[in-house]
Amino acid sequence: MTITPAAIVLADGTTFEGEAIGAELPGGVGSGEFVFNTVMTGYQEVISDPSYAGQVITFTSTHIGNYGVTPLDDEARSVHCAGVVVRDLARRHSNQRSAGDLDSFLRSNGVGGVAGVDTRRLTRHLRDHGAMPGAFGTAAASDLLAAAQAAEGTDGRDLVASVSTDQTVVHAGPAGADRRIVALDLGIKATIVRHLNALGEVHVIPAATPASEILALRPDGVFLSNGPGDPGAVSTVPDTVASLLGEVPIFGICMGHQMLATALGGVTHKLPFGHHGGNHPVRDESTGRVEITSQNHNYCVDPDSLARIEVTHVNLNDGTLEGFRSLDVPAFAVQYHPEAGPGPHDSRYLFDRFAELMDARA
């Protein structure tokens, strides 16, 4: 196998050497906001998560690609991340479900990356200095530095429109389940749709759909999905959610959590390096139980900016808000991913809680 030298140059000039993997990049340059993810498995689900639009994913786990890939694990119809960085890309894959190797998966989805990188050093740099724009590829170091300094982060960028569906998709519910759920697609994952579908018929709709059209579908509940970018830059969705409050039960996760909070008058801010991984401890304030959760977000909600809410979940690593419910209307949200694709299943009970909320309003 031919090894092509490649490099990473961050916006502050920090450089990392490696070898090119995945798709060939136009002009030998790719760019985006560099973040790190701490999952041990589930790399395909992470890479295909639309919430990573505009970002370059650095995997902290040393060996990536050892069990290959399968279409069954795709979280979206296409890959939106800007690139992938790994320490050791497996040259051989072995798994009975495998339909191909990770490098081919990256190439077929037009995603470039760099392997052989000192990802421990890169992760420590991002942890100490925060997620930052950068460039990677096979171009000259001077070209990569220029691209890194010109690269955009996620601040002030509405990336939801770039990943949301452009037409309504209906998933018929299981026999005997007569609930109708409308899912506002801010970058929804396939695993989320499967969990919602177990509760009833699911209508996945574009993010720009107005409240009047949502209510015309006569939903039993509205779900606000995960999604990429800066929640403060998403202009229309909070107004839509505000118009739905009190009209129908609402459940939001990740970006949906931030959109519900914004609709209730809350304020969001960016975390230094975000929460990305499948091992974040979160405490359920109602029971004291600690859940190990899957997370993927760069922004969080300031709980002091919200009135008439109950804090339901708190991150035990940094004390940030992980969940709340409204005291005035049937609406609740969590910042993490209870569907956990990939990740632990500790929080899947929240989908049952959504079903109970819908049934109580029936």
Image (cartoon, rainbow, N blue to C red):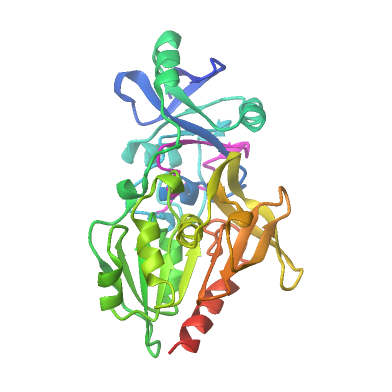
Asked if 292 appears above or below 203 in the picture, the reply is above
Counting from the top left corner in percent of width and height, residue 138 is at 40, 17
Residue in the image at 38% along x and 56% along y: 186
Q: Quadrant of residue 223?
A: bottom left
Counting from the top left corner in percent of width and height, residue 20 is at 44, 24
Q: Is residue 184 left or right of residue 47?
A: left
Name the foreground residue: 243 vs 297. Answer: 243
Residue in the image at 62% along x and 37% along y: 60
Labels in figure, total: 0
Q: Quadrant of the C terminus?
A: bottom left
Q: Is residue 327 magenta?
A: no
Q: Quadrant of the N terminus?
A: top left
- Residue furthest left as drawn: 167
Residue in the image at 46% along x and 82% along y: 358
Counting from the top left corner in percent of width and height, residue 3 is at 45, 20
The answer, for residue 185, to whether it is visible in the render is no
Counting from the top left corner in percent of width and height, residue 115 is at 52, 28
Q: What's the magenta region?
A: 51-70
The answer, for residue 264, to whether it is visible in the render is yes
Residue in the image at 31% along x and 46% along y: 162
Q: Is residue 57 magenta?
A: yes
Asked if 290 appears above or below 15 in the picture, the reply is below
Asked if 197 appears above or below 118 in the picture, the reply is below
- Residue furthest right as drawn: 288
Q: Is residue 163 left or right of residue 263?
A: left
Asked if 292 appears above or below 32 in the picture, the reply is below
